[in-house]
Image (cartoon, rainbow, N blue to C red):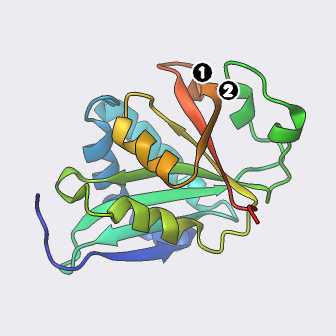
Amino acid sequence: MTRQGTITVERMDGPAAAHAQDAFRLIYAEAFTEPPYEETEDDVAAAFHRFPTQTRRPAFRAALARTGDGEPVGMAYGFALAADTKWWDELTEPVPEAMRREDGHRTFGLMELAVRGPWRGQGVARRLHETLIDGVGAERVLLNVHPAAEAASAAYRAWGYRKVGEARPWGTGDPHDVMLLDLARG
């Protein structure tokens, strides 16, 4: 395990994340070309073709973790789901209308969360997640996770997420678990 001093986690708005796109891409490419994801260079390119558009969404926010010398080690980003989101349409089985109702503020969609290999198991993912959703103002957080990504799935469950269904993101590929975190718990 590699430790390089203190890891800092910075929350970013869209323009700041767009400016740091190379760091997000480096982390994404390293994490998601590994099993079970096995994304190709084309997949990474497609994800970062979408990234500039995502960073311009009004409710976009991100978190970036770096070592003391500035090396990027982890990232997370997402945005509030629009009232007309297609996210719920990708589920393999329908969910109740009350669950799928969106208004542009109700649900924060966690699009990506990843930590580079040498820094895993050190609490970086938890810090990224906490930084990202702190003060988000949504009732809940929604994400998709590959079911074979056992460490990620276990972390999400430990953080309070529950599985609400399965989806095929972008209509193809392996089914992913759709998980929901209730922020409005009282």
Q: Which residue is drawn at 61% across and 26% down?
A: 167
The residue that disc 1 covers is 171
Mark 1 → mark 2, Cα distance in angstroms: 7 Å
x, y percent for residue 85:
76, 41
Q: Relative to 105, is 46 on the left or the right?
A: left
Q: Relative to 68, is 108 on the left or the right?
A: right
Three-letter amino acid code of the residue under disc 1: Gly
Q: Which residue is drawn at 30% across and 30% down?
A: 40
Q: Relative to 68, is 177 on the left or the right?
A: right
x, y percent for residue 158:
48, 51
Q: Choose top left, top right, bottom left or bottom right for residue 150.
A: top left
Q: What element carries label 1?
A: helix
Q: Residue at x 42, y 76 (%)?
A: 10
The residue that disc 2 covers is 90
x, y percent for residue 155:
43, 49
Q: Do the residues labelled 1 and 2 touch (CB within 8 Å)?
A: yes
Q: Choose top left, top right, bottom left or bottom right for residue 61.
A: bottom right
Q: Is mark 2 on a helix, strand or loop?
A: helix
Q: Choose top left, top right, bottom left or bottom right for residue 148.
A: top left
| Residue placed most toward the observer, 160 or 134 | 160
Q: Relative to 141, say whether 150 is above or below.
A: above
Q: In which quarter of the image is the N terminus?
A: bottom left
x, y percent for residue 92:
67, 19
